[in-house]
Image (tube, helix red, strand yellow):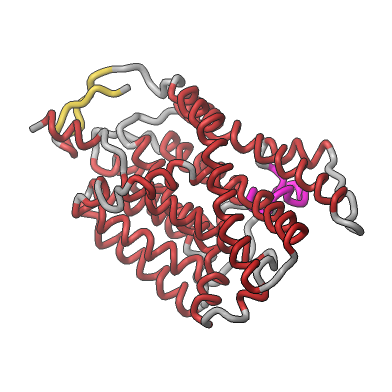
Amino acid sequence: MAGAEAHISTQRFAFVDALRGFAALSVVLYHAYEGGHITGLLAHLPAWVTHLLRQSGIGVAVFFVLSGFVISHSVARSRVTLPFVGRFMLRRSLRLEPPYWLAIALAICFAQLSARVLPGKELPSFSAGQIAAHIFYLQEMLGYPEINVVFWTLCQEVQFYLVYVLLLALSRNDPAQPMQGRATALTFAVAALISLLWPIGIFTEGPWRGSFLPLWHGFLLGSGAYWVWRHPAIAPYYLMFGAILLVAGVSHSDNFTTVCVLTSLVLWAAAISGRIYSACSWRWIQMLGAISYSLYLTHNPITGAAFRVGYMVTGRSLILEAVWWSLATCACLVFAWCVWWLVERPSVRLARRVRLAPARRETFPAWGRVRERR
């Protein structure tokens, strides 16, 4: 029995990967719409399709919830200390930054090329400070324009990761105790209450430029879905948190918050039913999930370039917009697969070489098994 549980615990969350793939694809579709590349086609599409495209950028909310769920899982069996925080952030950096830095270079090169090819377009200027700020996820805080509009989310994600593991370390989390111990549970209860101040409308701005706090509730909803799966006794508190956010999201027409709540509930339902390991496990959607990070980072310049070149070659009509929309989406997928294969996969392998803690045997009574931690 213990062996079977250990085997299940090492399985991939197929449903999480599928949601990640769908979220990335929705953002790709959104930028084709938002970039004005298919205006003629939109005029002939049903209103509900146009509405869905207009809202498809909300896939970012799904990413934030998934991050909370996955990061919580990745540290759940570890005693988080300040040295652990350093190793954890190094591991995340090795995982995230090579594809991200490539995407920065790609966006700069395509912007320069576009200005040289398109008549009347001004040559963009990127300062050393702007590029350096992007490399260290500081462009939002320092007020630099985004080199690629999608990069702002990484500034948020890095803050989510760092604050989450710091809270675990400072509250002296104990993985052998339910909810990592009383101090940790209380710390995150307070964090959840603070996170409510923005979606319910008490505050509208963060305490500093580019602050994670206005969007912190999305990450905590993902983390909450994970912890209530592992510790069902806290379900009433999780549901209360979600209900408050759902009411706030609907009453304030805050689609980000509403989608975060619904994504969290779907994750929880998939987890408690066991479907999180098997739902949407078709090979094509799992591959889409695998390349989702590279797809998200690189799709915007590829989309713009594909449409511009296409319309320069063939002209623009209703049918040609549909054709080039399909081809641009395919180009994004193929390019993302190449980045995943050549850059992201080696980054993942390199990150795994950073061990978060020494291998040792520990007992986790809350989960009823003994596991080898590595």
Q: Nearer the viewer, residue 124 or 253?
A: 124
Q: Relative to 306, is 4 on the left or the right?
A: left
Measured as percent of width and height from the top left, residue 63 is found at: 47, 52
Q: Within the magenta stretch, is there residue 238?
A: no
Give the number of callouts.
Answer: 0
257, 349: nearer the viewer = 349
Residue 145 forms part of the magenta stretch: yes
Across and down, in percent, residue 14 comes to 31, 46
Residue at image location 56% in from the left, 62% down from the top? 29
Q: Residue at x 32, y 61 (%)?
A: 265
Looking at this view, name the residue that lies furthest to the left.
1
Which residue: 73% across, 39% down?
Answer: 133
Asked if residue 355 is positioned above or below residue 95 in the image, the reply reads above
Task: Answer whether residue 370 is visible to the viewer in this image.
Answer: yes
Q: Position of residue 271 (x, y in %)?
A: 25, 51
Write the start and end of the magenta stretch as one range.
138-152
Task: List x then y, in percent, for residue 64.
Answer: 48, 52
The quarter in which the C terminus is drawn is: top left
* Front residue (pair 99, 255): 99
- On the question of residue 191 being in view, the answer is no
At a point 34% along the width and 40% down the height, the residue shown is 73
Task: Tell me the quarter of the image containing the N terminus.
Answer: top left
**Which image quarter: residue 326?**
bottom right
Report the front residue among 3 and 186. 3
- Compared across the picture, whether 199 is left or right of 369 comes to right
